[in-house]
Image (tube, rainbow, N blue to C red):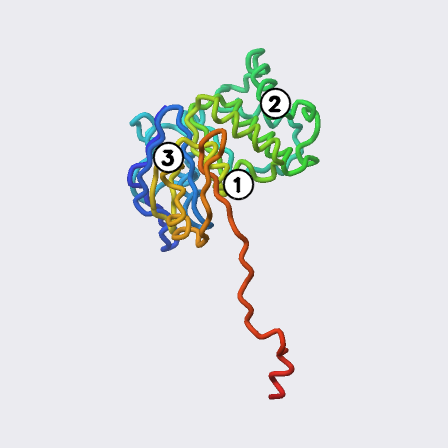
């Protein structure tokens, strides 16, 4: 399923959070959104999963305006993992994962055998089968994140929207999740802070800054030292991964410039 943001703008309380953002993710493509804090990545994703309505512009699924579909219809096509995903009720892991079937159920119908197997398979994919009877409030941040990813998969979406999905995950589960995205066949729109993970995972990257699109294209085209310096304020060395050929960024830590001579303390200066 093709996803299109057509000149999407968002204004809230007089502040412009997105400015005429136009992006497209083709069917089965992984589009990564990168940019500094406050650049508009999460705002763009909220428009896709309909937590926000654009002030101007449209979001389209296969050229159909999302606003013409009910929220339930949208939820059958789009699943989202948000930064704010949480639950205050101590459901078991199995119960939380099963909630992903809600858009498909009518009249309080119980899950059938196919749907129960779908839940089991999603838990296997995210390595949470052993947690099935645990309450979600007893889980670590990384465990809970994997449960919420399983819930999204159970929706059987055609578009998967992920806002910083690797938050709280250890390295093994980061690699497992992003490897799954490469092979799942879904249209994926994902916001990532780690530029190296974004380069390894995404077919194309869109760089946002102050609510506007700076540049979009394949990782090798986008992840240039001059662009990274202009948008993120750091200048990396860019090397090529020896096995995959994807660009990888190396950063040098810079000591802050001393503001005063080490030979002279503030007290000593005050007596001069």
Q: Residue 218 carries which label?
A: 3
The alpha-carbon separation of the residues under discs 1 and 3 comes to 25 Å
Q: Mark 2 points at which residue?
A: 123
Q: How crowded is mark 3: few (under 14 residues within 10 Å), some or many (20 or more)?
A: some
Mark found first going from the N terminus, 1 or 3: 1
Above or below 26: residue 18? below
Q: Which residue is drawn at 57% across and 26% down?
A: 150
**Residue 19 position within the rendered picture, expressed as x and y whole percent measured from the top left:** 32, 47
Q: Mark 1 points at which residue?
A: 83
Q: In this orientation, which residue lies closer to the viewer: 115 or 178?
A: 178
On screen, residue 28 above or below 49: above
User: In the rendered structure, which disc, 2 or 3, sits on the residue that comes first in sequence?
Assistant: 2
Among the 4 quarters of the image, the one containing residue 148:
top right
Residues at discs 1 and 3 in contact (Cβ within 8 Å): no
Query: Element type at marker 2?
Result: helix
Image coordinates for residue 206, horizontal then vertical, percent: 38, 40
Q: How crowded is mark 2: few (under 14 residues within 10 Å), some or many (20 or more)?
A: many
User: What whole-number distance in Å separates the C-alpha atoms at marks 2 and 3?
Assistant: 32 Å
Helix or strand or loop: what does disc 1 sit on? loop
Crowding around mark 1 (Cα neighbors within 10 Å: few <14, some 14 to 19, many 20+) is few
Describe the element under mark 3 as helix, strand or loop. Answer: loop
CA gap, disc 1 and disc 2: 20 Å
Marker disc for residue 191: none
Give the residue at the far bottom of this rendering: 272
Please name whichever residue, 85 or 35, is drawn nearer the observer in this view of the structure: 35
User: Residue 53 falls in which quadrant of the image?
Assistant: top left
In the orientation shown, which residue stands out farthest toward the top?
Answer: 113
Q: Closer to the camera, 158 or 50?
A: 158
* Position in image of residue 132 (x %, y %): 67, 24
Judged by depth in the image, the label closer to the viewer, 2 or 3, is 3
- State left or right for residue 162 relative to residue 2: right
């Amino acid at each position: 399923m093709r996803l299109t943001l057509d000149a999407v703008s968002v204004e809230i309380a007089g502040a412009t959070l997105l400015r005429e953002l136009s992006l497209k993710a083709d069917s089965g493509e992984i589009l990564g959104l990168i940019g500094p804090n406050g650049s508009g990545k999460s705002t763009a994703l909220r428009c896709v999963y309909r937590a926000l309505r654009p002030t101007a512009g449209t979001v389209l699924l296969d050229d159909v305006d999302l606003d013409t579909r009910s929220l339930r219809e949208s939820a059958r096509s789009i699943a989202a993992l948000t930064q704010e995903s949480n639950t205050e009720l101590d459901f078991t892991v199995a119960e939380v994962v099963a909630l992903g079937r809600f858009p498909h159920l009518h009249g309080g119908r119980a899950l059938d055998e196919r749907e129960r197997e779908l839940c089991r398979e999603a838990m296997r994919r995210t390595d949470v089968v052993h947690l099935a009877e645990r309450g979600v409030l007893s889980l670590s941040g990384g465990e809970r994140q994997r449960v919420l990813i399983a819930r999204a998969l159970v929706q059987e979406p055609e578009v998967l929207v992920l806002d910083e999905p690797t938050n709280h995950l250890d390295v093994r589960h980061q690699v497992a999740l992003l490897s799954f995205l490469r092979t799942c066949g879904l249209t994926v729109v994902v916001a990532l802070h780690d530029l190296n993970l974004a380069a390894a995972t995404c077919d194309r990257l869109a760089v946002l800054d102050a609510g506007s699109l700076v540049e979009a294209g394949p990782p090798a085209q986008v992840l240039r030292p001059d662009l990274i310096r202009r948008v993120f304020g750091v200048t990396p060395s860019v090397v090529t991964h020896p096995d995959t050929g994807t660009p990888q960024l190396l950063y040098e830590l810079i000591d802050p410039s001393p503001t005063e001579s080490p030979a002279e303390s503030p007290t000593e200066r005050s007596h001069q």
